[in-house]
Amino acid sequence: MKKPLMVIGVRQIGKTYTIDKFGKENFEKYLYFNLEKSKEIRDIFEKTIDEEKILEELELYIGRKIDLDKTLLFFDEIQVSENFIVSLKYFNESEKPYKIVCAGRLLRSKNKSI
């Protein structure tokens, strides 16, 4: 998986459950981050949209190095951070083997639905 996968839908339809199950069953390592519940995670994306700096901050947050070859990163409730959504462009353009899935409720930008 090279491109980040974004799963968007209404509340309570099983987005988190399905991705969580998929991550645990199909990846050697799996990390879950909830942007709505964790101000610390949300703040990482408020500070920068650079994917390498984000990775460094995530490693500091969890207290260990992230093995990108074996780890699925799941970001939940992404609708609370517009910067997170912008950062996906840089994860996508990177040569590093990021495996990212994100989920959120129907998103609205200032000008239109996303």
Image (tube, rainbow, N blue to C red):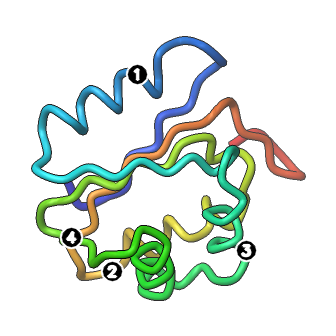
Label 4 to label 2: alpha-carbon separation: 12 Å
Say whether disc 3 or disc 1 marks the residue closer to the N-terminus. 1
Say whether disc 3 or disc 4 marks the residue closer to the N-terminus. 3
Amino acid at circle 1: Tyr
Helix, strand or loop at disc 4? loop
* Placement of the C terminus among the 4 image quadrants: top right
Q: 22 above or below 75?
A: above
Helix, strand or loop at disc 1? helix
Label 2 to label 3: alpha-carbon separation: 20 Å
Mark 2 or 3: the one toward you: 3
Residue drawn at point x = 63 percent, y = 51 percent: 35
On residue 17, the disc is 1
Label 4 packing within 10 angstroms: few (<14), some (14-19), many (20+)? some
Q: Position of residue 75 (x, y in %)?
A: 49, 49
Question: Outermost residue, top direction?
Answer: 13
Helix, strand or loop at disc 2? loop
Indicate left or right for 87 with 42 as reference. Answer: left
> Which residue is under mark 2?
94
Say whether disc 4 or disc 2 marks the residue closer to the N-terminus. 4
Label 2 to label 1: alpha-carbon separation: 28 Å
Helix, strand or loop at disc 3? helix
Q: Position of residue 2 (x, y in %)?
A: 24, 61
